[in-house]
Amino acid sequence: MVSRAVIVCLVLVCGHFVVEYVKDGYSFGKVVPPTTDLKDSPLTFAGWQGEDLPEDPRLREILCAKSGIDRLYRKRDGSRVLIHGVWTDDYLKLHFPQQCYRESGWEQVDSIDVKLNPKDFDNFTGRIITFAQGDRKIQVLYWFQLGPYTFLDRFQHRMLRRQVCWGQKEWPPLMKFMLETPYDPVRRSGESLVEFAEQFYCHAMESEES
């Protein structure tokens, strides 16, 4: 009979090789920056007029952001959308709206996943969260992007990282998009938020796909 000591040794050796295999597959590759900077996205498109806002250095530090955009877009009918977008080479420090809005005193009252259909691009899923603070309500649409793929939570991120990065020497940048607008059921603010996101995405990602 094989002694217990031999079995333990075999298990330890196998475990060592498994760990080394995983480490080798996930050995940190070089993150390739986006082809274009989000700051170069147009200030004017489809009736929207944008205004750049001051960056929040504390938030940029938390996200380990290399570059990004903080901009307020308005329309003549009074519609407005605040967009926050960044890219980073840090795959671990994810910061979700559920966390940052809650820490700012907002209460989540609703959440729904929506399909975005940007022209000439693959469809993808985003998430709209409705927050309330006193008498105020806002809607926030967000998604994260890793190369051509998107994700909405940590589990999807882990699965996607394995798919995109395993064994690769070059990794795509991790991008975060978050859009905020006042809640307005009369103007169907959720639908307007999706429409804006589709239009902005086409302009922001045009050079990435070319």
Image (cartoon, rainbow, N blue to C red):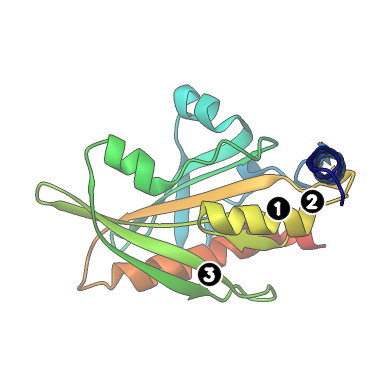
Out of 52 and 87, give the one closest to the viewer. 87
Q: Nearer the viewer, mark 1 or mark 3?
A: 1
Local crowd at mark 2 within 10 Å, few (<14), some, or many (≥20)?
A: some
Q: SS for tag 3?
A: strand
Which residue occupies the extreme front position in the image?
1
Tell me the distance, in whole angstroms, between the alpha carbons under discs 2 and 1. 5 Å
Residue shown at the point (67%, 74%) measured from the top left = 122
Vertical arrangement, residue 25 with respect to residue 156, above or below: above
What kind of element bears circle 2?
helix
Q: Residue at x 26, y 72 (%)?
A: 187
User: Can you identify the residue that label 1 sits on?
Assistant: 161
The reply to whether dot 2 and dot 1 touch (C-beta < 8 Å) is: yes
Report, in whole angstroms, how far the alpha carbon at label 1 lies from the one at label 3: 17 Å
The residue tagged with tag 1: helix, strand or loop? helix
Query: What's under tag 1, amino acid-wise?
Result: Arg
Q: Which residue is mark 2?
A: 165
Q: Alpha-carbon neighbours of circle 1 within 10 Å: few (<14), some, or many (≥20)?
A: some
The mark nearer the N terminus, 2 or 3, is 3
Residue placed at 29% from the left, 35% from the top?
103
Q: CA distance from mark 2 to mark 3?
A: 21 Å
- Vertical relation: 155 (above or below) 101: below
Compared to residue 25, the image places residue 66 above or below, namely above
Q: Which mark is residue 125?
A: 3
Residue 145 can be seen in this image: no
